[in-house]
Structure formats: C-alpha cells, structure tokens
Image: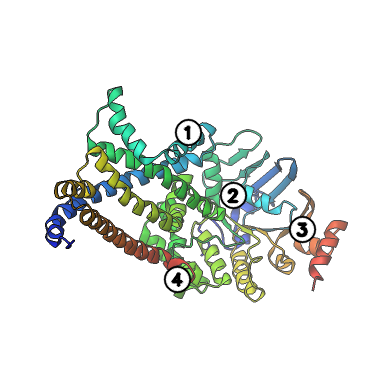
Amino acid sequence: MSPTSQPADKSTDKRAGAAAPQARPVLSVRNLAKAFGSNVVLRDIDLDVRRGNVVALIGPSGSGKTTVLRSLNGLETPDAGTVTFADTATGTDLALDFSAKVSKKDVSDLRDRSAMVFQHYNLFPHMTVLQNVIEGPVQVQKRKRAEAIADAEKLLARVGLSDKRDAYPFELSGGQQQRVGIVRALALKPQLLLFDEPTSALDPELVGEVLGVIQELAEEGWTMVIVTHELAFARQVADEVIFMDGGVVVERGPAAEVLRAPRQDRTRQFVRRLLHEF
Amino acid sequence: MPFNWDLVWSSFVPIVTGAVTGTIPLTLASFVLGLALALLVALMRLSRTAVVSGAARFYVSVIRGTPLLVQLFVIFYGLPSLGVKLDPWPSAIIAFSLNVGGYAAEVIRAAILSVPKGQWEAGHTIGMSKGLALRRIILPQAARVSVPPLSNTFISLVKDTSLASLILVTELFRNAQQIAAFSQEFMVLYLEAALVYWVICLALSTGQSALEKRLDRYVAH
C-alpha cells in the first residue's frame, strides 16, 4: 500500500545512492518559533526528515512537540521560521517562510503533502467508515469514486477492518477508530504521515493493535513524524528521536542513543520516569 | 345555547382552504427564506471581521427586540411613506423571513459552535477549505443539534402567520374572523380555527420526531 512516490525499501532509493550519501531531506524545518500571547511554546526548532525515515518527537506535555507537528500540517501558524518540502517530482520545492505572511495557497499546498492522525481520532461521526476514508480522495482530490472505494477497501483489509466498512464510528472500539484514522490519512497518499500521540486516548489493551499498524507502515518505508509517549515503541520504529522540553530541542540522535544513553540530564530524567513509572 | 353544528360544517371548508392556500404556503416560504438568511447571519456572526459580525449582531438584536406585529406593520403600512409599496403577501413573507432569520441565526450559530474543533481540523488535514469543511463536515453535524430548537421556531411561525390577517392576507384566521363577524358565532369559529392550527402543529411535531430519529442514527444511544 506504499504509494508509488515512496520506495518500499530505503536501500533501493537511487536518489539517495551514488550522488549523495545523505540525500536532501524531504522535509526541513528551520528556526520555527511560536508564542501564544506571552507564552512561548517553540524556540528555534530545527527538524530534518529524510524520505522513508521515522522521526519520534518525545517530551513532557507542554514541551511544544504537538505544536511542531501541527505546524507541519498548517493547523498552527508559527510566528517565524521556515518549512521546506523537497519536491522530487517537479523539482520545485515548497518553501514557507512564516516570518512573513504565508498565502492560503501555500498552506493548502503544505497540507496536501502530509496527513495527520489525531490523538482523539477525529473521525467524521456522521459518515460510515468507508465514507470517512473516501471523503478526502473524492471531495478534495477529485478522484473517481469507484477508484477511491477500491483503494479504501484494500486499505481497510490491510488493517483488518473490512467488515466495518459500513459501520459508523460510534460502533467501533477506540483501537478500531484509530486504525480508520490511519487509513483515512493513507488514502490521501501523502508524502508524510503525522501522528499526534496516536495511542494516548486508548485503553491499554488496545494500544498494541494501533502500534502494530504504525510499525508496519514504518517497515514499508513511509516517512513519518510521530509524537508519542510510548518510548519502547519509539526505540523500535524511529530512526531519530528528538527530545523536547520547554519549547526547545534538548537532545536529538538515533533512537537507541537518545533513549538508552541520553547525554542530557533532562532527557535522562524524562526517560527514566517514563520507563519506570509502573 | 345549542351548539351550532351546521355552522361548524359550513365554515370548515373556507377555514381549511385558508390553511392550505394561506397559512401553509406562507409558513413554508418564510421558513425556507428565513433559514437561508439565518445561515448567512450565523456565519457573519462567526466572522473575525468586527464590522461583519457587528452587523449580524445588530440585526439579531433588532429582530429579537421588537414585536413581530410591529415589524409586520412597519413593512406593510410604514414603507409606503418611503415610496415602497408592497402587497400583503410579499410584505408578510418579508416580515416573517426576517423574523425567522433573526431567531434561527442564533440557533445555527450555537449549533456550529457545538461541533468539536477537531472536526474542522480533520477536515483541513484531508485538504478541505473552510467552505468545503463547513458544508461536508460541520453543517451536517450542526443540523442534528439544531433540529429541536428550529422545530420550535417552525411551529411558532405557523401560529405567528395568523398576524398576517392584520395586513389583509387571506389565510386561516382571516377567513375564520370574517365568518365570525358575519354569523356572530365567535366561540365556534375561533375554536375551530384553534383546532386547525393545532392539527397542523401536531403533524409538524410528528415530522420533527421522525427527522430527529433519522439524524440520530450515527450517535451512540
């Protein structure tokens, strides 16, 4: 179910091959800043996401990680900083500089490149599962309905929800709703998937089914940014872990390093607290 | 005094005719136009532009703060002095639409605000513009919430249309009045008129229940 624009296997990505050992990131964020009134929530955030990579944003609540994620999808407008999407298809990058006023068109283009999975699923309650999934492809992307339905059915089968096709969201468990949320995002064929604490609203016994799906997506080569409190999961799927606190990046690096052997005190405290909270 | 059954039967046809050719079309036309106006005013009220939301607020305040009968008289008897002369029917439809527009605007505004913010965001994340998200995601959910209060507005409107008799619109109540004046049987005629209004409203209440049930199909019980 990986889109054609996204190679299933990172090692076969020719663009990343001979020319440059480290290909240009698909997404670059520089100096992102945001304040709500006098409350500064983001200071100088930099972020690079390479094609096929998974970046996990971790940190205590109020650290700004969700705001970073929402900025990438145009749900939040930063006060300053740039967000750049490398466009390999057309060769023209999409670059937004939030220091100036960004146009509606740019925000809309930014949104087209990514899709968000929400903490509280945010499924459309008045639509069936299938209608939820095809809404974007049919109403926004103007794809043929029959085609969108065929795609949606494949995706639903993938996450084991074929039999819930015509159910309304209220008839589903939290885990099932979140899997529909993921399918709704996938159906848009975005270049980047954004997850905002996708398992935080779930009963503990339902967390596994959702993390399982996300892990499979990572293995298929989807590019993802995940805000999560599931550190064991982050260690397993993330290529890079970024620890944020107080609106700044405190520490970043390969998942194993940041989570097993953090260099900063604040990271160490956070990781220890989360791993030993039971 | 023996109850005058003959008069009941002979007046039945003109009164029901008044309902079918006067009260009901006047109600329907005013409600549909009023709702369209209300949606516009509700969206204006939610606008971040102060002038736009202020204008909507002013309109709602005037409509809710003045008697419907006065509004009706201003349009029918008042406007001619400004050179605008309207027939009874257009006057009535304009007055009732403006009135419904003011009351229903507040209902629709509250219903739109009752839809969680996450629904807007989910619409945006699948690429929807504000307008498309409003039409496809927000309004269908707001509709469910607003059916009970809008039904109240609708039922009130049915009864309020009797005021149109005062600007010479031939409708249910005017027909009843004329027969009453002629026959001097006030009690019989006015009770009969009341009964017909009640039957119309009963039918509307039934319709309201059916609509609520239909719109509730996607909500946990």
Q: What separation in Å lies between label 2 and label 4 (alpha carbons)?
A: 28 Å
Instruction: Kindly give the residue lying farthest to the right in the view shown.
Output: A265
Q: What's under tag 3, amino acid-wise?
A: Pro
Q: Is residue A154 left or right of residue A241?
A: left
| Residue corresponding to mark 4 | A167
| Residue corresponding to mark 1 | B55
Q: What separation in Å lies between label 3 and label 2 (alpha carbons)?
A: 22 Å
Q: Earlier in the sequence, mark 2 or mark 4?
A: 2
Tell me, for residue A60, which label it has, or none.
3
Marks 1/2 in contact by CB < 8 Å: the verdict is no
Q: Earlier in the sequence, mark 3 or mark 2?
A: 3
Query: Which element carries disc 3, helix, strand or loop?
Result: loop
Q: What's under tag 2, amino acid-wise?
A: Asn
Q: What separation in Å lies between label 3 and label 4 (alpha carbons)?
A: 36 Å
Q: What's under tag 4, amino acid-wise?
A: Ala
Q: What separation in Å lies between label 1 and label 3 (alpha carbons)?
A: 45 Å
State whether residue A43 is above or below residue B210: above
State whether residue B15 is above or below residue A40: below
Q: Mark 2 Cα within 10 Å, few/some/many (few <14, many 20+)?
A: many
